Amino acid sequence: MIPPESGSSPGSPRISARRRLPVAFLCLVLVGVALAQAAALAGGLWPEEEQRLRVGLKLFPAVLGAVEDLKRDHSRDGQLHIAVGYQTLDASVREVVSSIEEVGEVQGLRLKVRPVPIADLLAEADASLAAVFVASVGMASAQLQRLSEGRGVLVFSPFTGDVARGAVAGVYVTDRILPAVNLAQAERAGLRFKAFFLRVAHHEE
């Protein structure tokens, strides 16, 4: 028989300790969950959104390269100016900027990438942009539509539902991963895509 701890009456401390163990364990679990949630929010994205973001970064150069007359209509000073639109500047946004910069060039045109708050993109009239990569979730449909229609540029969002709600292109995930395109929105933005891209892309209604 294990003796009770010194300075305590027999029996009661051991019972109390047994009762405290499940409570302590539950507290640790709750703290762990809270920390995991905080970490996800600190990065700005939940795991599923983070996965879609990474897939989008792989698809984005090909989608941008499939825009017809890219050099004639969307290049400035021999470069393609890409805005990474965000609501909160966090690690995931910086990663998007870095990843697109590493692509180097599309259609022989150097990529010039900068992070820009969504509010500024909606307010400013910057004619130099070739595309906007949306790096934050939760944009309203009207915002997505204004970005492409007001600027006549490719608005690419990898997040669930954004292509249907007004982004020109994004990610379609089922049993396989495809680029997604909203042709009606592309037409409103004055954009056309090459035939090979349209054959492989998912067409969002």
Image (tube, helix red, strand yellow):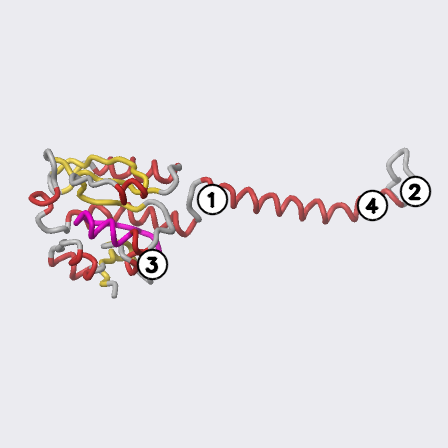
User: Circle 1 is placed at which residue position?
Assistant: 40
Of pointers 4 and 1, the one earlier in the residue sequence: 4
Residue 106 rendering spot, x and y as whole percentages: 15, 41
Q: Which residues are magenta?
A: 144-161
Which mark is on residue 161? 3
**SS for callout 2:** loop
Distance of mark 4 from mark 3, alpha carbons?
52 Å
Give how far apart the Cα atoms at labels 2 and 4 are. Answer: 11 Å
Q: Are marks 2 and 4 in contact (CB under 8 Å)?
A: no
Instruction: Tell me the element at label 4.
Output: helix
Amino acid bearing label 4: Ser
**Residue 172 in the image, given as x and y percentages of width and height:** 29, 58
Q: Earlier in the sequence, mark 2 or mark 1?
A: 2
Name the residue: 52% across, 44% down. 36
Q: Is residue 146 magenta?
A: yes
Residue under label 2: 10
Q: Decide: is 10 above or below 181.
A: above
Q: Is residue 151 magenta?
A: yes
Label 4 vs 3, first from the N-terminus: 4
Which of the numbered marks, if any, corresponds to residue 135? none
**CA distance separating discs 2 and 3:** 64 Å
The residue lying toward the viewer, choosing from 120 and 10, is 120
